[in-house]
Image (cartoon, rainbow, N blue to C red):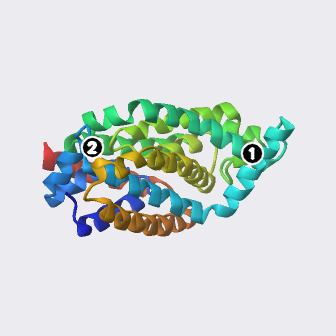
Amino acid sequence: MITYFQAIIMGLLQGVTELFPVSSLGHSVLFPSLFGWHDLARAQAAPESFFLAFVVALHVGTALALVGVFWKDWVRIISAFFRSVAKRKVETSDERLAWLLVIATIPAGILGVLLEHELRVVFAKPLAASIFLIVNGGILATGERLRRRAEVQAVAMKHGLNPDAEGRRLDTMEFKEAGVIGVAQTGALLAGISRSGITMVAGLLRGLDHEDAARFSFLLATPIILAAGLYKIPDLMGTLGDGVRGQALVGGLFAALAAFVSVKFLLKYFETRTLTPFAIYCVVFGSAMVIRFA
């Protein structure tokens, strides 16, 4: 089973790494093995286990923290969504953002339901997670390099922006572009690939600046993470949750706290900075873990 100390550590780890572009799933696979928590390490790759029930609370806690940070945005977005449905047309930037989020959520939602369990069983191993973490670093670094190329600059210039001075506004995105970003984030079903990272890269390659790419990533993560948690609530309430519900509550609370602090920090960070430090971290840490677990 899982102790309360382990629950706190895993909660903090989830809350930070879900939003930092470094893969929460990858770190949740690697850290138990690093700490010698072999019961947790084995449970992650099992078809059914107490750990999978425990993770439900971490997802819900993280999502609730995101709702807390962006609650004003979500009030506007949800109101705009129903307003546009009633009018049967999209007129305002909030209405457009609402539909961008809906469209981008669909691919991850469908593939998550179909493949998440199978991919976790196959790839929730330390060596695989280490390799994918290196791949994640490569994705972040490549995204930073490519975003300045002519195609991305052309997208920005098409919308009347100076690509070297400011990014494209989020509300100028087309619906098909949101679909592309939604498909891209399904890569996060693999342990080691970051949902927030791959979503940000997809946004950057469509001409968004780092701040808007991060904001869109966090908004998009909210319904997906919350749905992933709520979808598996029966696991936590059923026999798999026996003996871990108290730990799950504590872990969820610490995940919420860590996520709240993380998103506040990252929103400020991406006003002026890039994904490069996270790319370096993923490559260095992933390489060290390959050596450790090879």
Residue 208 visible in rendering = yes
Residue at 81% in and 41% down? 84
**Which one is nearer the viewer's eye here, 98 or 241?**
241
Q: Quadrant of the C terminus?
A: top left
Q: Residue at x 46, y 56 (%)?
A: 60
Q: Earlier in the sequence, mark 2 or mark 1?
A: 1
Q: Please state which amino acid type lies under the numbered disc 1.
A: Phe
Q: Which mark is residue 129?
A: 2
Q: Position of residue 80 (x, y in %)?
A: 77, 49
- Front residue (pair 175, 103): 103
In the image, residue 257 sits, relative to residue 177, either above or below, namely: below
- Which corner quadrant holds the N terminus? bottom left
In percent of the image, x 50 and y 36: which residue is there?
108
- Nearest-to-viewer mark from 2 and 1: 1
Q: Is residue 178 above or below residue 33?
A: above
The image's mark for residue 81 is: 1
- Amino acid on which the number 2 mark rests in the picture: Ala
Q: Secondary structure at mark 1?
A: helix
Please tell me whether mark 2 sits on a helix, a strand or a loop.
helix
Mark 2 crowd level (few <14, some 14–19, many ≥20, 10 Å Cα): many
Horizontal side of residue 32 vs 168, given as left or right? left
In-image side of 22 versus 155 (left or right): left
Residue 262's x, y, as percent? 47, 65
User: Spatial distance from mark 2 to mark 1, Cα to Cα?
Assistant: 38 Å
Q: Is residue 276 left or right of residue 7?
A: right
Q: Which mark is residue 64?
A: none
Residue 81 pos. (x, y %):
75, 45
Residue 135 lies, in percent from the top left, at: 34, 40
**Crowdedness near tag 1: few (<14), some (14–19) or many (≥20) residues, C-alpha within 10 Å:** many
